[in-house]
Image (spheres, rainbow, N blue to C red):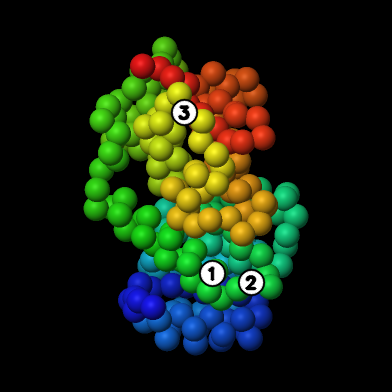
Amino acid sequence: MGVYNEKILVVDGEEKIRQALATRLTSRGYRVILASDGEKALSAFKIEQPNLIVLDILLPKIDGYELCRKIREKSQVPIIILTSLNTVTDRVTGLNLGADDYLVKPFSPKELEARIRAVLRRSTSITRTQPTTKKQILNFGNVVIDLHNSQIVKNDLRIKLTTVECNLLELLIENAGKELSRNIILDNIWGYTPQRDIDTRVVDVYVSRLRAKLEEDSSNPILLLTVRKFGYMFQDYL
């Protein structure tokens, strides 16, 4: 087991969970900041500038959804939602607000640690290296994909990509014309193998977000295609 030193903000309304996570993550070397409600969490985020946030949804004062939205207006800090809310709608809402991952209570501490490491590893490597796609600017009519600057230009409008969106799009473009399963995408972008079928829902949500930015008609995509009951594929443009 490695020892790490990143700063993690744990936001949860249950004291037992806050303390349990603080004890476990501190033992791994992480520096842990705790917040019991949304207002305290927002203040701690501004002061501490954590490397990652573990965020509950059911919080006093400012709920987790609103907190996630407020943080995403200012920062791309990785956010893992950890909550008892377990419907597909709850997951989609959290992910659409910009969360990087979603884990349901009761949870395995080892699984949470694995996801924290995967998210931190991805965010750290992104800051150190440029995308590996050989051609970083691609033209598709009135759509220009600029991976170097993490953006899409559509109808002369610049649309910023989040870190996860840019890496997902890069993976799909590098494998243009190849069918990629949801499991393969999850492993390459999120860094873990799904334990349950619903774990791959994060892939569907992020593909939907990409299509909204990329496609002229996201309900009838021509670039980012669905492979029925399997996964996704970027059109073979070569």
Residue depicted at x 65% and y 24%:
219
Among the two numbered marks 3 and 1 on one chain, the one whose residue lies closer to the N terminus: 1
What residue is shown with label 1?
Answer: 112
Tell me where residue 228 appears, x and y as whole percent. 65, 30
Among the two numbered marks 1 and 2 on one chain, the one whose residue lies closer to the N terminus: 2
Real-space Cα separation, disc 3 to disc 1, in angstroms: 31 Å
Residue 107, numbered circle: 2
Residue 40 at least partly seen:
no
Real-space Cα separation, disc 1 to disc 2, in angstroms: 7 Å
180 or 10, nearer to the observer: 180
Tell me where residue 6 appears, x and y as whole percent. 35, 72
Real-space Cα separation, disc 2 to disc 3, in angstroms: 34 Å
Residue 178, numbered circle: 3
Residue 82, numbered circle: none
Q: Are marks 3 and 1 in contact (CB under 8 Å)?
A: no
Q: Quadrant of residue 238?
A: top left
Q: Are marks 1 and 2 in contact (CB under 8 Å)?
A: yes
Residue depicted at x 56% and y 42%:
182
Residue depicted at x 56% and y 86%:
19
In this rendering, the label closer to the viewer, 2 or 3: 3
As drawn, 214 above or below 162: above
Residue extending farthest to the top is: 141
Q: Give the left or right position of residue 75, taking residue 18 as reference.
A: left
